[in-house]
Structure formats: C-alpha cells, structure tokens
Amino acid sequence: MNNLIYEPAGLLKRVIAFFIDYHLTLFLVCFFLLLDNPSGATDSWLFVLLVFWFWVFYLFLKDALFDGQSLGKKILGLKVVDFKDQTKPCNLIQSIKRNFV
C-alpha cells in the first residue's frame, strides 16, 4: 500500500530548482564580495571565508530551511518532506545527507 502524501518531483523540476538556488547564492556571494571592495580585489580574507561558508551552509541546509522549500523549490511548487512522516519538512540532518550526495 502506498501511503505517499506527496508525489516525487520529476528530474527536470529538481534540476531547475537546483539551478535557481545555485545561481541565487552565487549572485549573493558576488554581491557581498563587491560590497567589500567595489574594485573586485578583496583584501579581507576573513570576509571572503565568511561569504564562502554562507554559500556552503545554504547549499547544504536549504531543504531544512523555510519549511522544506528553498526559493527554487518554492517557485516550482516543490517541497522536501521527512521520509517517514510526510507531514513534516525534512530536518537539518536529512538536508545535509541529501545535499551531500
């Protein structure tokens, strides 16, 4: 018996949502780096590291934030839910595992 509340998303929607999220974070990283130094040459390595870690954390944790919907998923009507209890969004550990693979 199939007890799925949500149907799994197709590959194309997943790829498009990933590209939206990836490019959004890439834009934010570039924006913050340019705020640090408009000429593009960044002298503050600490700032660069903070921006880089923001990018990494967002890409790994985006499915556990915002009720299981990153911006890309929200635009495409997708949602990441807990595997065992589909009434709940995925948690931080699940988000890290699914984005690490």
Image (cartoon, grey):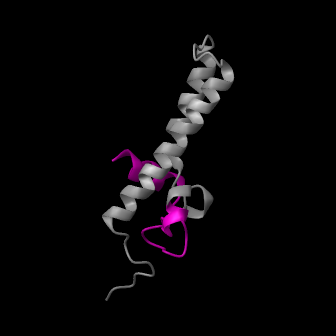
Residue 13 x/y as whole percent:
39, 64
| Residue at the bottom extreme, as displayed | 1
Asked whether residue 5 is drawn in magenta, I would say no
Residue 99 x/y as whole percent:
41, 49
The N terminus sits in image quarter: bottom left
The region drawn magenta spans 73-101
- 81 is higher (above) or lower (below) than 17: below
| Residue at the top extreme, as displayed | 43
- 14 is higher (above) or lower (below) than 26: below
| Residue at the right extreme, as displayed | 35
Question: Horizontally, is 17 left or right of 36 in the view?
Answer: left
Residue at image point 51% right, 57% down: 72
Residue at image point 39% right, 53% down: 98
Residue at image point 68% right, 25% down: 35
- 33 is higher (above) or lower (below) than 62: above
- 57 is higher (above) or lower (below) than 35: below
Count of all numbered marks drawn on residues in the image? 0
Q: Please name whichever residue, 32 or 56, is drawn nearer the observer in this view of the structure.
A: 32
Q: Quadrant of residue 66?
A: bottom right
Q: Please name whichever residue, 55 or 82, is drawn nearer the observer in this view of the structure.
A: 55
Residue 79 x/y as whole percent:
50, 67
Asked whether residue 100 is drawn in magenta, I would say yes
Residue 83 x/y as whole percent:
42, 68
Residue at image point 61% right, 10% down: 43
Q: Please name whichever residue, 81 or 20, is drawn nearer the observer in this view of the structure.
A: 20
Q: Quadrant of residue 17?
A: bottom left
